[in-house]
Image: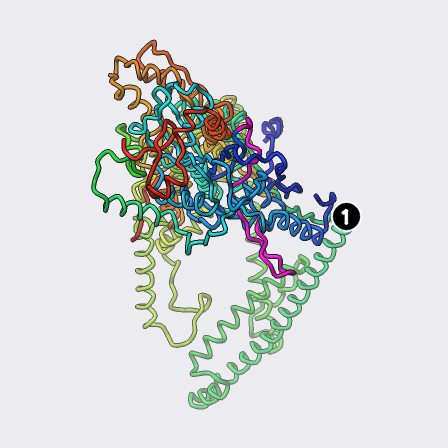
Amino acid sequence: MPRDSSLPPLKIHTLSEPDASDTPEPFDDAADYDPNVPIAIDFGSSEVRAGFGNQDQPSHIFTNRISRWRDRRKNRNLTFIGNDTNLDLSVRSQAKSPYDGAIVSNWDYTEEIMEYTFHHLGVNGNDGVSNPILMTEKLATLQSQRENWYQLLFECFGVPQVTFGIDSLFSFYANNDATASGLVINSGNEDTHVIPVMNGKGVLSEAKRINWGGRQSVEYLSNLLALKYPYFPIKPSTHQFQSLYEDFCYVSVDYQDEIRKILTLEELETKNIVVEAPFAETVQPEKSEEELRLQAEKRRETGRRLQEQAKQRRQEKLAQKEEEYEYYTQLKEQMKDQSKKAVLSTLQSAGFDDEQDFKKYLVGLEKTLKRAQVLEAGEEEEVSLADKFDLVDVPDEQLNEEQIKEKRKQRLLKANFDARVKAKEEKLKKEQEEEEARQKDEAWRSEDLQGWIKDKRQKLTALIKTRKEKLKIKNDMKDRKSHAAQKRMKNIATLAEERSRSSAKRSRQQSTVDNDPNDTFGANDEDWLVYNDITSNPEALDQAIEEEYNVIVGLEQQLLEYDPNFTEEDTLDAQYDWRNSTLHLFLRGPRPHDSENINEQHQMHLNVERIRVPEVIFQPSMAGLDQAGVTEICETNFLKKFGSTRSQLSEGSKKLAANVFLTGGNMRLPGVRERIVREFTGMLPMGSNLNVRMASDSAVDAWRGMAKLSQAGSQYKGSYITRKEYQELGADYIKEHNLGNVLFL
Amino acid sequence: MPPSNSPGPMDRIEFLREVAASNSTDGLHLKRASWKKPHRRHKATRQLVTDEWKRLSNTPSEANRLTYFNVEAPPSIYPAKKYCDITGLKASYRAPGNGLRFYNSEVYSLVIKPMAPGVDQQYLRLRGDDIVLK
């Protein structure tokens, strides 16, 4: 289509796996080590951030993964952790996480990663680590998790004291005063939660968790794309899906409005993202013109030779048949005056059952001969044979035996010749008729254009209607239970029955369509109707649809030429225009698709997914989670708790609304703040003071909060549990503080 | 220590060995000498959650205890919006055979109707509505 070539090509993003890095994780200078400075470790499910509390940035941030790599030559296992797993692709592919979902499940890995962390922080070991430790944990974590952490930190690393706190509260603390109030919305790698904070203390009785985070989103995206492109040539890695999610997904400010419009050409122009998987292009060697010509010549030559061979074989066969025919005619002549018994014995010795069998064979032979001669003659030069039929009209009495034979031959040939002439005449006549019809049509058009157009249009409408019906029947055929399919089976059954009944009457000999004397099919015109029913099988129907389509295209061509009101857009093809196809726009974006193009075969189009995937935290039901979304949880907090009503916010709720705080790695998606502002404005009473802000660095702020707490003097003193307390009070003891978990609400 | 710009496979392995050696914590006393690694410290999350559930049901019930389970967000009180399982657009229709929701007749006739067996369940699984055999 000419229109498409004017469209600019879309920007193509490549789906790439990052290269292996060359720099191992650095070590902090052991000379700066001070055994009294608290160490803060945010042991998250995607990343570990670790550093000393007196710094303002964690000195180490690495992926929380560990890889056991086999050094085959030395027959040893080497362990790589964090960023070091990226030093080699084979190491990276074997990397595992100590987490299983949101929960630490492998404590051997955890122990090694913690030791690695201390080592890189430059800790000078002295029968353990002598620094106080601050750690993050999940909101309402399992007790076994905390027990294991206590065990690991106190018994293995021998640390003097540990503070545990909730990551999002640390992040809030890093960005606010110690006594600030606000509503914390955290969306992390494994879950999303909402915690109200009153005067610096997390109100965990109103905290709620949605079991959906960045990891689930990436998985959801990969599932959606796998179903969208089931025949995609490669399977992208989780890592690649993650970068698709981080780079291209965004939170829609008005989801309902956006999904209504997104699959339109104008919107897709900006919102459609093309991602191409890398592939090795196989280049077909281009053939030169000379080569192509030689190839074609060779093909023609072979064809000619084959044709000649076939012709020769045919002629040989024909000669043989002619001989046979002559022989048997002679035999027939001879048998005329012999006794019946003698005839039978002669025939039986020649391999026939009886006289009838013989006659039949002779008739069949005559027929095949006739046909073969026609075929042969058709290929010969058209020579006038009329003068060769001199003997045909001479009575037998005047001829000798030789001539009679010749006469019989001539009669055969003449019949052929006549038939050919007749066929030729008929063809000519038909051509003439067509030409006449065309002229008549043209004359009609020039005389009465309106009438002509009307007629053609009517024909077109009728054809399109029958086409639709045929398509429907074709569709029905696929269903065994449909009316069309059942009718067809019935027809076949009836035919089979008739055939078996009539076959009993037939003679034992083989009979073909050509020489079966009992076969009277076709004598009656109604016989042919059977084909109308039986041909309604899918293949024949396909053919009929194809033929009809050609007629439609022909008619449309005429109308396009002469009818000013009939444009390209009215044609049947235009109705299958990709621009009008939701699925095309969804799968192939705002450009035509060429399924032969190898680049396009390796392309995925992200459009609805871009907003569909991040939307789950607002509408968890989309992904099958039977939980309220972020907005609904906040709505409950604002309007039903802290003494508020739907129409009147309490003082506490006002404080929450004035400081809505977004944190967590998954909140880095674009548009999330705008969306929350929009939804909260709609839900809060008119004129409420709403203030929504993002954590200054969603991923690192939790660590900063820990560092800040470790320098906070008295507040810090109230937050840690010492080794002595652990030994006395046991593993289920929790030191409750503003930013940590609590045992009772 | 980083290898040259185009390290050969041997260099790379040598480099990996060097990094692993530099990460070795032997003799650094980061762990207490008395520490003995406990046995079998690997449990799947599902098992850990079940254990927690058992622990909570065995301890005397205290209504206001904060647990892993009661911080879960409750089900929504609003009716769930329905979206096309294929395209994600708003769905007004539902396929009679398998219950897939769809946006328009084109999606139905070109995707849902000729769908291979089992694929419908994959779509349904995405919104947690598939048939799970136990």
Q: Inspect the magenta stretch and tell me whether residue A73 lies in it.
A: yes
Q: Does the image show residue A729?
A: yes
The image quadrant that residue A617 belongs to is top left
Identity of the residue furthest to the right in this view:
A290
Q: Inspect the magenta stretch and tell me whether residue B49 lies in it.
A: no
Image point (65%, 61%), residue name: A387
Task: Determine whether A50 is above or below A672 in the image.
Answer: below
User: Residue at label 1?
Assistant: A288
Is label 1 in a helix, a strand or a loop? loop
Q: Quadrant of the C terminus of chain A?
A: top left
For mark 1, does the 10 Å Cα neighbourhood hold few (<14), some (14 to 19), or many (20 or more) residues? few
Image point (48%, 84%), residue name: A351
Q: Does the image show residue A601?
A: no
In percent of width and height, residue A553 lies at 51, 36
Task: Determine whether B114 is above or below A372 in the image.
Answer: above
| In front of the other: A331 or A223 | A223
In percent of width and height, residue A669 lies at 48, 28
Task: Determine whether A743 is above or below A697 in the image.
Answer: below
The image quadrant that residue A492 belongs to is bottom left
**Magenta part of the chain:** A54-80
In percent of width and height, residue B83 lies at 36, 33
